[in-house]
Image: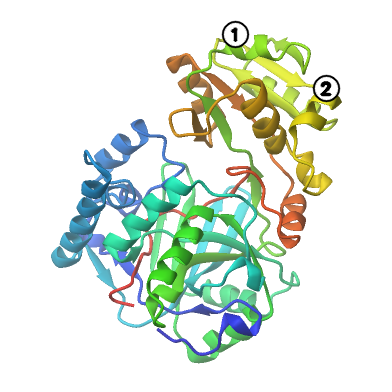
Amino acid sequence: MNTTGSAANGGLHLTPFRGLRYVPERVGSLAAVTSPPYDVVVRPDGVHHLQSADPHNIVRLILPQAPTSEARHRRAADTLRAWLSDGVLAPDAEPALYVYEQRKGDLLQRGLIGALELTTPAEGVVLPHEDVIPHVVEDRAALMRTTAANLDPLLLTYRGNGTATGATAVIERTVRRAPLLSTTTEDGMSHRLWSVTDPAALAEVADDLGRHQALIADGHHRWATYLRLREEHPTPGPWNYGLVLLIDTARYPLQVRAIHRLLNHLPVADALTALAGGFRVRTLDGPLPAALDALAAAAVDGNAFLLAGDGRFHLVDGPDPDLLARTVPRDRPEAWRSLDATVLHATLIDHVWRVPDTPEGITYIHDAEAAVAQAARRGGTAVLMHPVREDVVRDLARQGVTMPRKSTSFGPKPATGLVLRSLEVD
């Protein structure tokens, strides 16, 4: 690994690495071995679907199945070792940065995948914007520790000047060449990957990124995992770096979506009864898209949520100001205090509904339709959210204020399985 320069000098330090990639001749297709990020896969249906797509699907590494956590992590490590031994996965011959492109219809996203030098939030180089769930960090750390691999890149954003200079110029020159790989996944998204090994191009990227800070768009738990494992390996080396995808959102703006909540043991009728006097509730007619449109319209005027799970949709808005004053912490900026996620957790989940924020109590689901279906199946309540604007997220992050966990979903997210990083090879 090239470790010239340092993020400690004030900016991003993205380094080349020898990517692990699937050998096309050893798998059914590249599309069949990829997966969404681990926290987007809807378990267990999603895991089973991906496992059946190809015996070498990456889900066997990122979400291994076994009776205990220790057995799951060991199974992933054994599987990774076997795939390397059998030539299913192989490291590239020389270290590289990787240009990664996603395209679907009018959507086009391009960025750079590399090993980013790790920094703490206090250093102000990589800015988190969400709190994390400790048990998820512990699980990801154990998996990463056991496999000695970064299995999927985090999604980070930075703001360039909007022109084809620096890293963006390198990207746009690179995509004129034939890619290392090209595939289209079942969601209709096309993916292409190129390597950048030319020293002059790598220097151009380093000079540009060294002047920027980044926002974690997706992957807070994995970033916290990187930092934990770096503390366990104080000697400079591969554990001082983590696999990331960096996107210049001045050039390629991301989409921002909400992450929904499933309150597993709270029936919709009980949730609605508890809201009396504290929120306005209106039952809506029509399908999910129309209900989401109504949620978006209500969110313009203040906090709004959509409850589902009983075959109907219930728009919840107009919170009582006195209730908010009593339940929302006062030690944060007004922008944080007025967030839907803040009000949902501080006022509704903690105070009104008294639902424990544990894996048994709350499931976080990215897809609204899946959240509604699971709520109906489990007899629980789906709480559908409206997304937060990116500028609000970035402003709070720059103030060092983290949002409630799972407040946002930036996308499109990188496909998992196109390039991995082994800390033993790197």
Q: Quadrant of residue 43?
A: top left
The reply to whether residue 219 is in sight is no
Q: Residue at x 58, y 43 (%)?
A: 406
Is 94 placed left or right of 172 in the picture? left
Percent across and percent down for residue 93 are: 30, 81
Percent across and percent down for residue 296 are: 75, 30
Task: Work out whether residue 173 or residue 100 is closer to the camera in this orientation and state it.
Answer: 100
Is 375 placed left or right of 186 in the picture? right
Q: Circle 1 sits on which residue?
A: 269
What's the image's color scheme? rainbow
Percent across and percent down for residue 421 are: 36, 68
Q: Quadrant of the C terminus?
A: bottom left
Q: Quadrant of residue 123?
A: bottom right
Is 275 placed left or right of 267 in the picture? right
**Mark 1, secondary structure of its residue:** helix
Q: Quadrant of the N terminus?
A: bottom left
Q: Is residue 174 above or below residue 359?
A: below
Give the amino acid type for the residue marked by disc 1 in the picture. Ala
Q: Quadrant of residue 293?
A: top right
Task: Work out whether residue 181 or residue 371 is closer to the camera in this orientation and state it.
Answer: 371
Q: Residue at x 71, y 60 (%)?
A: 400
Percent across and percent down for residue 378 are: 43, 17
**Mark 2, secondary structure of its residue:** loop
Q: Circle 2 sits on which residue?
A: 320
Task: Work out whether residue 388 or residue 272 is closer to the camera in this orientation and state it.
Answer: 272
Q: Residues within 10 Å of mark 1 (few under 14, many from 20)?
A: few
Q: Residue at x 50, y 46 (%)?
A: 133
Q: Is residue 281 above or below residue 193?
A: above
The reply to whether residue 311 is in sight is yes
Give the amino acid type for the residue marked by disc 2 in the picture. Asp
